[in-house]
Amino acid sequence: GTLPEVERVHALIETAHERYRGLDDGKVADYIPSLGEADPALFGISVCGVGGQTTSVGDSTHPFSIQSISKVFVFALVCHELGHSEVSRRVGVNNTGLPFNSVMALELSDGDPRNPLVNAGAITTTSLAPGSTAAEKWDFVQRGLSRFAGRRLELDEKVYASESATNQRNMAIARLLQSYGRMHVDPIQATDVYTRQCSLLVTAEDLAVMAATLANGGVNPITREKVIDASVCRDTLAVMATSGLYEFSGDWLFEVGIPAKSGVSGGIVTVAPGKGGLGTFSPRLDPAGNSVRGQRAARFLSHSLGLDIFAST
Ligand code: GLN
């Protein structure tokens, strides 16, 4: 099946927005200082169908840094270049059960980055992007993510500067990967490209289009550009299903039943394969770093739109 007609989808996202906008559980991330300035009241929801129909409610055009959601799209682009076996060998596809920036996860696995959606695996994935210099890798990442969004995505210079000044832990993770023989470029430069990718500005509407591209076998439903192969989409969705919401990935799949990825600025991309994509934005986070209202909205919409991939009816 496909999504219901756009009027019906709009009525449901209005209902979700109405229901959850008063929820003020959770806290805005502040370990990256400039993220702490986000207005906790912001809440946007956007849906894009595989046929290109879009509908939005609330703060759906408010820009915010993409953060960890970038990991999904960089993984997809690198997977498209290197192939299924190579990325599973070099990055891994298993959940860590530990926080996204865990050093212990890396130590426990003798330097195996585990999966592309935790920082160790994401920095590894970024390091594998085509190009012999950091500038070429960054260009590949920025262009690639922009193709998913269907418009040129720009850096939030303030967030980039703020995270660059405080990302000692990520630099340590990259150094540790290097010590295990897992990093074949300069680790500090790899971390810098990763920090840049996390600082790209998007809106909930962009996230819906990016998610819909993954729902649509890699073809952006708005621009009709083929960004990645359908088989790579499938691989990416499998990784999102196991590890998209960090240590709450199991809870998510159990409650919502479709692949997703969160980021600490408050975005979530949720993908209904073959149907469409959902982008949500609300800055208050649960203890793992996942948007509280975004999770509630996605759960409500998955049920009301019949998106759960495990449901027989
Ligand atoms: N840039 C952030 C970091 O590396 C992204 C984390 C996230 O969104 N979970 O810490």
Image: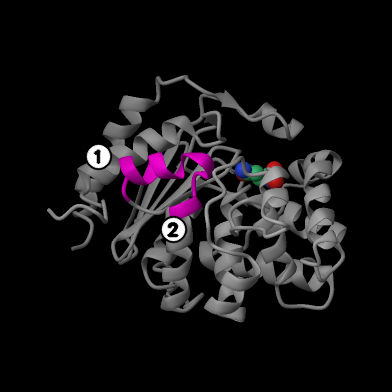
Q: Residue 294, image x and y in percent?
A: 43, 37
Q: Which residue is mark 1?
A: 12
Which secondary structure, mark 1?
A: helix
Residue 89 sits above or below residue 169 on the image: below
- Residue 165 shows in the view: yes
| Image depth: mark 2 or mark 1 in front | 2
* Callout 1: CB less than 8 Å from ligand 1: no
* Residue at figure coordinates x 58%, y 54% from the top left: 117
Residue 220 sits above or below residue 61 on the image: below
Q: Main secondary structure of the magenta part?
A: helix
Amino acid at the residue labelled 1: Leu
Left or right of 116? Residue 216 is left
Q: Which residues are magenta?
A: 242-257
Q: Which residue is mark 2?
A: 211
Q: Residue 44, image x and y in percent?
A: 44, 38
- Residue 220 shows in the view: no
Amino acid at the residue labelled 2: Ala
Which secondary structure, mark 2?
A: helix
* Residue at figure coordinates x 44%, y 72% from the top left: 218
